[in-house]
């Protein structure tokens, strides 16, 4: 039973929709062919970089009301879609084993396919995230542009390939997006939210789980279909090309997001800590004194005593010079 889905079916005119809007039919369903998807994503890149060029000599646009509506829609829409998917996955899961719920062809139900389509179209709405950034004259980071365009491509290929583990990846993504788009909605309204750092941690955790599932499913498929002498459980449904592309893109996401986390949160914290250590007579200052004492010891062994002693430490200018050398060598 899926009470939420059943309720929505009674109040929404889903029955009057043409078949190609409720079932994924390659070549008929909108945005279901490589040429159309390629042109759409190429147009996205042209538009955002065109806007960036156009805005060079113009003041940044606030667009706060539109931005909040956009984020509220994606947060609430992701929450509703996640609830619908949870109902359908639960109905499949209770009738089968965990492995079959992830890997059996029967786990690709008509309702889940419809939900996957909605999620896929959400990815094109999410491209407006970048439009807002460009209009506000914010930097267009490679991670942002690549992730948005590649995720639309990822959803397209998984619909074509009917990869049975799709519900795991999509559910985690929807969960993150409920929180992430709420954050953008709230902060655009002036709210001060302290947990921004943990959004990136949540995304990294999402990709780690994703990769475990998709690599597991891909291994099971290849072991079953091509290397039956390898230990495996059974086939994991989906085309090989879709599985390999999914593994590749999700792996790149994990690497890029970890790098972003380090550059954004870890390096500044380390630099601040080292800076505070030097200012407070710790960190670099202690290391400078240690080097100075070592040099004095060498002088003493050679009978060349003079200058500052090991106890007094180097003169302030020398200490600053040594600190600068040490900092440069650690960059």
Image: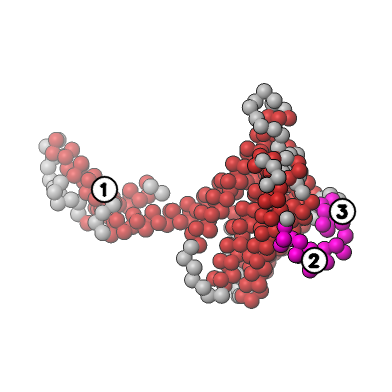
Question: For the residue labelled by badge 1, is the local secondary structure a helix, a strand or a loop?
Answer: helix
Q: Tell me the residue at 14%/51% (across/down).
A: 312
- Asked if the stretch drawn in magenta spans residue 4, the answer is yes
Residue 10 is marked as: 2
Magenta stretch, residue numbers: 2-25
Residue 287 is marked as: 1
Circle 3 or circle 1, nearest the eye: 3
Label 2 vs 3, first from the N-terminus:
2
Do the numbered discs 2 and 3 sit on residues whose CB atoms are within 8 Å?
no
The percent position of residue 234, horizontal first and vertical second, equals: 69, 32
Relative placement, left or right, of 257 versus 309 is: right
Main SS of the magenta part reads: helix
The CA span between labels 2 and 3 is: 26 Å
Tell me if mark 1 has few (under 14), some (14-19) or many (20+) residues whose alpha carbon lies within 10 angstroms of its own: some
Label 2 vs 1, first from the N-terminus:
2
In the rendered view of the protein, which quadrant contains the N terminus?
A: bottom right
The percent position of residue 79, horizontal first and vertical second, equals: 64, 62
Question: For the residue labelled by badge 3, is the local secondary structure a helix, a strand or a loop?
Answer: loop
Q: Circle 3 sits on which residue?
A: 28
Relative height, residue 243 to residue 200 (above, below): above
Residue 116 appears in the rendering: no
């Amino acid at each position: 039973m899926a009470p939420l889905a059943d309720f929505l079916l009674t109040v929404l005119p889903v029955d009057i929709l043409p078949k190609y809007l409720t079932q994924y039919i390659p070549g008929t369903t909108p945005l279901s062919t490589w040429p159309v998807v390629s042109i759409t994503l190429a147009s996205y890149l042209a538009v955002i970089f065109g806007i960036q060029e156009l805005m060079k000599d113009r003041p940044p646009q606030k667009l706060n009301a539109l931005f909040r509506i956009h984020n509220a829609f994606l947060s609430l829409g992701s929450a509703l879609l996640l609830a619908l998917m949870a109902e359908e996955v639960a109905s499949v899961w209770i009738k089968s084993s965990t492995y079959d719920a992830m890997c059996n062809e029967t786990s690709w139900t008509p309702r889940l396919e419809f939900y996957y389509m909605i999620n896929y179209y959400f990815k094109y709405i999410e491209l407006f995230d970048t439009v807002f950034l460009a209009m506000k004259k914010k930097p267009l980071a490679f991670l942002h542009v690549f992730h948005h365009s590649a995720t639309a491509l990822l959803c397209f290929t998984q619909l074509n390939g009917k990869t049975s583990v799709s519900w795991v990846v999509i559910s985690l993504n929807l969960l993150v997006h409920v929180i992430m788009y709420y954050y953008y909605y709230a902060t655009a309204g002036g709210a001060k939210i302290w947990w921004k750092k943990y959004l990136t941690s949540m995304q990294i955790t999402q990709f780690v789980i994703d990769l475990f599932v998709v690599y597991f499913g891909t291994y099971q498929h290849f072991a079953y279909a091509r290397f039956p002498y390898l230990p495996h459980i059974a086939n994991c449904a989906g085309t090989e090309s879709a599985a390999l592309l999914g593994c590749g893109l999700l792996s790149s996401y994990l690497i890029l997001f970890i790098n972003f986390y380090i550059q954004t949160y870890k390096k500044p914290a380390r630099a601040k800590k080292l800076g505070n250590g030097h200012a407070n007579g710790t960190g670099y200052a202690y290391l400078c004194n240690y080097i100075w004492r070592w040099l004095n010891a060498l002088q003493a062994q050679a009978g060349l005593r003079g200058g500052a002693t090991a106890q007094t430490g180097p003169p302030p200018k020398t200490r600053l010079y040594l600190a600068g050398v040490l900092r440069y060598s650690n960059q």
